[in-house]
Amino acid sequence: MKNPIIGITLDYEVSGGYSKFPWYAIRENYLSCLHKFGAIPFPLFHQNSLNDYLIKTLDGLVITGGNFDINPSLYSKTSDGSRNLKNQRTNFEINIFKKFIQTSKPILGICGGEQLMNVAAGGDLIQDINTSIETSIEHEQSNPRNEVSHEVEIKNNSKLFQIIKKNKIKVNSAHHQSVKNTGENFTVSAFASDKVIEAIEHTQHPWCLGIQWHPEFLITDADIAIVKDFIKHA
């Protein structure tokens, strides 16, 4: 059995911090969690002209999160709490997602990656949870990201339940936006007690999941199961 090559999207900064010039970035555990279970992570340059080649070469796709929001003009007439837009990154991720969804290769969207897939499929987002709904959950948790912070409930009839085999799990949480109305062929597979959507899955694709938390930290058995099942299908 070969080691599958997994395309993984990068964050992008115009300047500041690492360099005065534009640079890419990714947190180490996005890569190491794939390598740990036998996959080869392959970071993706934001260049749409390469995507036809990439979908032939890669065995799976991970769309990552980051410190940014998707431009609300893609799904809403108004901006209501979105911040730090990165249009070049978003354009690339929408383009490669739309190509991958036409294949049978597995796709995993993590945090902002889940939101990206939903918007690409015609869905929309809650632009700022704290100003849009009443909740006692810290969706941008104050404790370290490598710890769990709140519970989510998994739907029994979902692919996610088939993978983790539990109705309720604890997750970490690092987001101020979330899926609102699901896009075409997506359905909700998990939610928090305040009804914030925590996972979505594609009904027509053999393996396409969006996860609002960060399973790449491999905190729980559920996180490990998600990553391992994704790699198995790659």
Image (cartoon, rainbow, N blue to C red):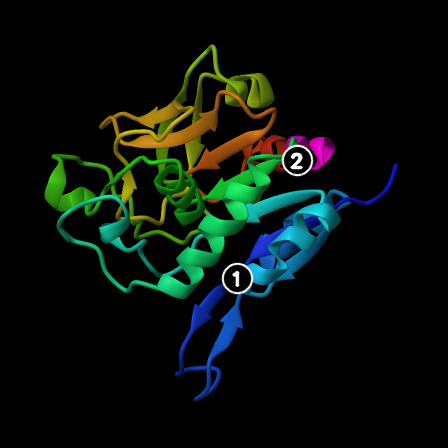
- The residue identified by callout 2 is 105
From the top left corner, tell me how far across and down residue 172 is, in percent.
41, 42
From the top left corner, tell me how far across and down residue 213 is, in percent.
42, 41
Q: Secondary structure at mark 2?
A: loop
> Looking at the image, which residue is at 45% across and 16% down?
167
**Of the pair 110 and 12, the residue shown nearer to us:** 12
Task: Give yes or no for contact between labels 2 and 1 (Cβ–Cβ under 8 Å).
Answer: no
Q: Secondary structure at mark 1?
A: loop
What amino acid does circle 1 point to?
Leu
- The residue identified by callout 1 is 10
From the top left corner, tell me how far across and down residue 17 is, in percent.
42, 82
> Looking at the image, which residue is at 66% across and 47% down?
55
Q: What is the span of residues highlighted in magenta in the rendered image? A: 229-234
Distance in Å between CA atoms under marks 2 and 1: 19 Å
In the depicted structure, whether residue 51 falls above or below residue 123: below
In the depicted structure, whether residue 156 falls above or below residue 186: above
